[in-house]
Image (spheres, grey):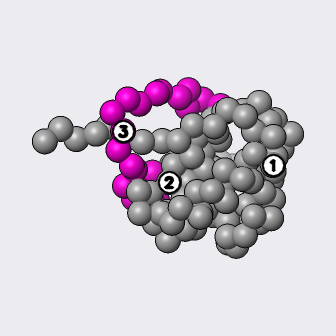
Amino acid sequence: MKLGGHGSPGSDEPEINLISLIDVLFCLILFLVMTTTFTQRSVMKLQLPQAESAARADPGNTLVVAINADGKYFIGNNEVLKTDLASVKEAIVRVVGDDRKQPVVLRADGRTPHQSVVTAMDALGQLGFTRLSIATAPEQRR
């Protein structure tokens, strides 16, 4: 009878199973990548129209409606696939819910067709938003 020998089943050294740790880390990284939100500014390069005076809006609880030069709408961080009035209204309601007191910033590219800006303003007006501001860039001095 061998007691405490090298080959006994009770003398195995404890091991750390690294494969399960790698799986957990991979799931955490995948979760973080999938849930990360990216700012709208990095996605779209807008040339805002210029104005001499610029009012500063509180960016904390502000809905941002962006329109690029091609007339495509972006509500918050989501692109609206159709450009008709009903689709824009539906996208706004989906993002905002019932809060109509929320301030709205309309960020339209300077080359955006005027009809696209009017459609966005019409959708916001029909939904009952009253605090609308249009984003501009400071005028460049020559």
* Mark 2 crowdedness (10 Å alpha carbons): few <14, some 14-19, many ≥20: many
Mark 1 vs 2: CB contact within 8 A: no
Left or right placement of residue 128 versus residue 116 in this view: right
Q: As shown in the figure, which amino acid type bears the numbered disc 1?
A: Gln
Image position, residue 75 (x, y; %): 65, 54
Magenta-colored span: 40-61
Q: What residue is pinned by disc 3?
A: 51
Q: What residue is pinned by disc 1?
A: 126
Q: Between tags 2 and 3, which lies in front?
A: 3
In the figure, 137 relative to 65: above or below? above
Inspect the magenta stretch and tell me whether residue 54 lies in it. Answer: yes
Pick the residue in front: 112 or 81: 112
Inspect the magenta stretch and tell me whether residue 50 lies in it. Answer: yes
> Where is residue 72, by image quadrant?
bottom right
Q: As shown in the figure, which amino acid type bears the numbered disc 2?
A: Ala
Q: Is residue 141 in view from this perspective?
A: yes
Q: As shown in the figure, which amino acid type bears the numbered disc 3?
A: Ala
